[in-house]
Amino acid sequence: MGEWCNMLPQEWFKFVNQEVKVTAQDQQQYEGFVFTVDPVSSSLVLVTFEEKRSASVRVVLGHAVRDVQLLRAGDEDTERKMRSLFIPAASQDFSTEELEERKEDLRAWLEKNLVPVTDEGDVLRVANVLTVSAPYGPEQCSSSNEIILARVQSLVESKPGRENQQ
């Protein structure tokens, strides 16, 4: 595998929901399931499931990653457990179809307002600097750029029909 930080996001995406062993710069090794890879810093978010209902989360900073080895492919059960860790309890009240409809409504609203948005599975990515996860409200917007975050949250709040979706 090439240098981790020089890989493309599409290459990192192949590791999501997979069990991996990460070797860091200091030769320390970390194992877990990849929840996501930050496209800016190339940092990995690893989840390790402990007893039945607990898990630990570790972030391995991208610049420290020397090697990522695939240990085992994740399955639907793993994906479901990881989603339940990070998706707010409120969104679990929605069916898969309702969440898909909410995501599509928000995507259309953002596009109508000339905001560049891409659909990346369970997440909408706005201008490559902000993400919106289920259930696709202002509280689920995430970005390190506070100005963009505030503007997109304001736009999401102003979406027609939003008062019926809370």
Image (cartoon, rainbow, N blue to C red):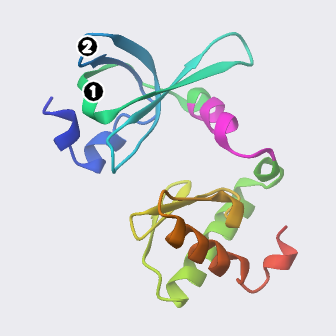
Q: Which residues are magenta?
A: 79-89
Residue at the limit of the structure toward the front, as seen here: 147
Q: Is residue 150 magenta?
A: no
Q: Residue at x 79, y 55 (%)?
A: 94
Is residue 47 toward the left or the right of residue 118 in the image?
Answer: right
> Which SS type dominates the magenta stretch?
helix
Residue type at the position of mark 1: Ala
Is residue 99 toward the left or the right of residue 149 in the image?
Answer: right
Q: Residue at x 66, y 78 (%)?
A: 154
Crowding near the residue tagged with mark 1, few <14, some 14–19, many ≥20 C-alpha atoms within 10 Å: some
Q: Residue at x 23, y 19 (%)?
A: 25
Per the image, the residue denoted by label 1 is 64
Residue 67 appears at what percent x and percent y?
23, 22
Tag 1's secondary structure?
A: helix
Is residue 52 toward the left or the right of residue 103 in the image?
Answer: right
Residue type at the position of mark 2: Asp
Residue at the limit of the structure toward the left, as seen here: 2
Q: Is residue 1 something one can see in this rendering?
A: yes
Disc 2 + disc 1, Cβ < 8 Å: yes
Per the image, the residue denoted by label 2 is 26
Q: Is residue 79 above or below residue 109?
A: above
Q: Is residue 143 above or below residue 148?
A: above
Residue 151 appears at what percent x and percent y?
58, 77
Q: Residue at x 70, y 54 (%)?
A: 96
